[in-house]
Amino acid sequence: MALGVVDGKDPIVKEESENEPLLCSRCGRQVQGRHGMCNQCGESAQQCVRCRNINYDKPDAFLCIECGASRFAQLELQIVYKPGLGAERIETEE
């Protein structure tokens, strides 16, 4: 058995703003319409950037309820695993 060490950084989360414009998840242009339809590509700006699901209960949700993607943040996780020598071997009682 080996012990592992996990090293990571604190996530950077952008503060949400009331005046932040709604951007289309497909073409990246600012959406002007009140229904969230992009005039450039015709897609709904409220849809998830990964799975295209639309959350009608909370359109400005931080995470997609289907796939967990977020249009507001990106999480990068790097795991460095090193075996430890300080653990005793575990054996079965058989």
Image (cartoon, helix red, strand yellow):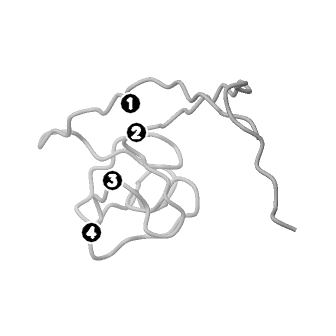
Quadrant of the drawing holding the C terminus: bottom right
Q: Which amino acid, by three-letter code, is at mark 3? A: Phe
What residue do we see at 15% from left, 38% from top? 17
In terms of sequence position, does the residue under pointer 1 or pointer 2 come before the other? 1
Q: Which amino acid, by three-letter code, is at mark 1? A: Pro
Question: Are the residues at dot 2 and dot 3 in contact (C-beta closer than 8 Å)?
Answer: yes
Question: Are the residues at dot 3 and dot 1 in contact (C-beta closer than 8 Å)?
Answer: no
> What SS does tag 3 mark?
loop
x, y percentage for residue 73?
A: 40, 39
x, y percentage for residue 14?
A: 28, 32
Residue 32's place in the image compared with 93, above or below, is above
Residue identified by numbered label 4 = 58
Report the Cα–Cα distance between label 1 and label 2: 9 Å
How packed mark 1 is, by other alpha carbons closer than 10 Å (few <14, some 14-19, many 20 or more), is: few
Residue identified by numbered label 3 = 62
Residue identified by numbered label 1 = 11
Question: Are the residues at dot 3 and dot 4 in contact (C-beta closer than 8 Å)?
Answer: no
> What SS does tag 4 mark?
loop
In terms of sequence position, does the residue under pointer 3 or pointer 1 come before the other? 1
In terms of sequence position, does the residue under pointer 4 or pointer 2 come before the other? 4
Q: Residue furthest right?
A: 94
Report the Cα–Cα distance between label 3 and label 1: 14 Å
Residue identified by numbered label 2 = 73
What residue do we see at 47% from left, 37% from top? 74
Residue 89's place in the image compared with 43, above or below, is above
Q: Nearer the viewer, residue 61 or 26?
A: 61
Tell me where residue 11 sits by quadrant.
top left
Question: Are the residues at dot 1 and dot 2 in contact (C-beta closer than 8 Å)?
Answer: yes
